[in-house]
Image (tube, grey):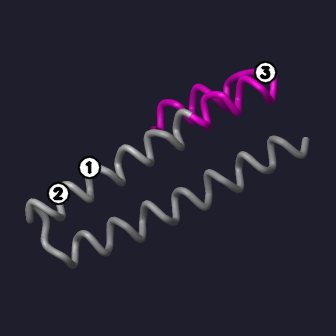
């Protein structure tokens, strides 16, 4: 995900930037799924799960804001 954001922000056009940021958003969804699996299999304790979900949500909100700002340029 960080590599997609980095690559996207190095692109010249808004369309190209958004393409890579969309891939970063998809990677966030993948991370969410892996976290859910880890929770169901009890690989991670509930406190760590809660904390990580909070961080995922925060990153998603920042990414959405970045995408909106690029669309509005």
Q: Which residues are magenta?
A: 1-22
Q: Quadrant of residue 73?
A: top right
Q: Is residue 50 left or right of residue 17?
A: left
Q: Is residue 46 magenta?
A: no
Classify 10 Å Cα crowding around label 1: few (below 14), some (14-19), many (20 and above): few
Classify 10 Å Cα crowding around label 3: few (below 14), some (14-19), many (20 and above): few
Q: Which residue is mark 1?
A: 34
* Distance from the alpha carbon under mark 2 to that under mark 3: 38 Å
Q: Is residue 20 left or right of residue 12?
A: left
Q: Which residue is mark 3?
A: 12
* Distance from the alpha carbon under mark 2 to that under mark 1: 6 Å
Q: Quadrant of residue 55?
A: bottom left
Q: Which residue is mark 2?
A: 38
Q: Report helix, strand or loop for mark 1.
A: helix
Q: Position of residue 38 (x, y in %)?
A: 17, 57
Q: Position of residue 49 (x, y in %)?
A: 25, 69
Q: Position of residue 29 (x, y in %)?
A: 43, 48
N-terminal-most mark, 2 or 3: 3
């Amino acid at each position: 995900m960080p590599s997609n954001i980095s690559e996207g922000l190095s692109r010249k056009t808004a369309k190209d930037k958004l393409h890579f940021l969309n891939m970063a958003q998809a990677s966030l969804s993948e991370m969410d799924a892996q976290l859910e699996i880890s929770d169901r299999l009890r690989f991670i304790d509930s406190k760590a799960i809660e904390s990580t979900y909070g961080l995922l949500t925060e990153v998603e909100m920042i990414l959405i804001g970045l995408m909106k700002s690029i669309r509005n340029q």
